[in-house]
Image (spheres, rainbow, N blue to C red):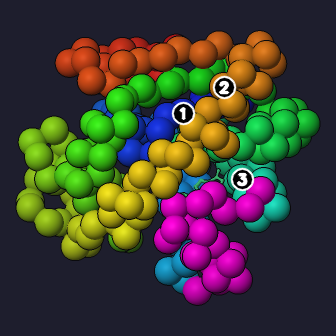
């Protein structure tokens, strides 16, 4: 099993870059945010517990996340897995390593905070399948307001509101950024892409195919 981690500030473009890969179906994408949003939408116990954390920009407690993600990884029938939004705390990183899940690399998408805030303003997502699109001409849907993949009407995420984005950026620097050190200490290769550069998409695709 080849596991890759997509790492970066919320809104740095992880889901968007992955969604723009031509052969993305080859990979099993485990997006914790999408799993949680589906749980909220379906009104499950997990969704009920996670919702207030998500709406305020906080992280959902590790106790609700760790087993959810480890089970999703272990039950995957694909060989290539992409973790989008995990691990986001040092505790999650240690739990992943303790479960003998040793990713082959971390792809860091790097963006200045002000660019993240602008991009959050420009983002819409599919409420059905989670695919993100942009309102600018970077990665728009083929038909305005409609998901290319499943035809649902696109929406703005509540946590893309500016105050929530700023809170999520704070949480990233205090709780998530230290995860990089844990992963690199475990011997996992860390590749950083400057996601403001025109060539970032090519660099991303190249690393995803390594
Ligand atoms: P995302 O779509 O990845 O930006 O995630 C949306 C929200 O889901 C985050 O702001 C958190 O509240 C929650 N979330 C996603 N991944 C995690 C995680 N690994 N640990 C805790 N909370 C998470």
The disc at residue 7 is 1
Instruction: Give yes or no for contact between labels 2 and 1 (Cβ–Cβ under 8 Å).
Output: yes
Magenta part of the protein: which range? 43-62
Earlier residue among tags 1 and 3: 1
Q: Given this view, does label 1 or label 3 mark the residue nearer the observer?
A: 1
Q: Mark 3 — residue?
A: 69
- Whether residue 15 appears in this view of the structure is no
Left or right, 155 with reference to 180: left
Is residue 11 found left or right of 26 in the rendered image? Answer: left
Give the residue drawn at x 32%, y 58%: 162
Mark 3 falls on what kind of element? Answer: helix
Q: Could you say where residue 151 lies in the image, as x and y percent from the top left?
A: 23, 68
Q: Quadrant of residue 203?
A: top left
Q: Main secondary structure of the magenta part?
A: helix
User: Foreground mark, 2 or 1?
Assistant: 2
Mark 3 close to ligand 1, CB under 8 Å: yes
Mark 2 highlights which residue? 180
Q: Residues within 10 Å of mark 3 (few under 14, many from 20)?
A: many
- Please state the horizontal and vertical placement of residue 180, each as a whole percent of the image: 66, 25
Secondary structure of residue under mark 2: helix
Quarter of the image with the N terminus is top right
CA distance for labels 1 and 3: 15 Å
Residue at the extreme bottom of the image, as rendered: 43
The vertical placement of 144 against 103, above or below, is below
Instruction: Mark 1: give few (<14), some (14-19) or many (20+) Cα within 10 Å.
Output: many
């Amino acid at each position: 099993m080849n596991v890759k981690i997509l790492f970066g500030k919320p809104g740095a473009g992880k889901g968007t870059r992955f969604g723009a890969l031509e052969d993305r179906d080859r990979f099993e994408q485990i997006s914790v945010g999408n799993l949680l949003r589906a749980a909220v939408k379906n009104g499950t116990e997990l969704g009920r517990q996670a919702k207030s954390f998500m709406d305020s920009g906080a992280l959902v407690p590790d106790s609700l996340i760790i087993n959810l993600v480890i089970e999703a990884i272990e039950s995957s029938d694909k060989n290539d897995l992409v973790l989008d939004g995990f691990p986001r705390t040092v505790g999650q990183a240690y739990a992943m390593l303790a479960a003998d899940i040793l990713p082959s690399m971390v792809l860091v998408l790097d963006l200045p905070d002000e660019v993240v805030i602008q991009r959050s303003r420009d983002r819409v997502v599919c409420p059905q399948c989670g695919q993100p699109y942009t309102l600018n001409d970077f990665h728009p849907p083929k038909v305005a307001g409609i998901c290319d993949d499943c035809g649902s009407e696109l929406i703005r995420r509540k946590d893309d509101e500016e105050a929530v984005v700023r809170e999520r950026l704070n949480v990233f620097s205090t709780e998530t950024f230290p995860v990089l050190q844990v992963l690199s200490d475990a011997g996992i290769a860390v590749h950083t892409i400057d996601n403001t550069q025109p060539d970032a998409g090519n660099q991303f695709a190249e690393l995803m195919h390594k």
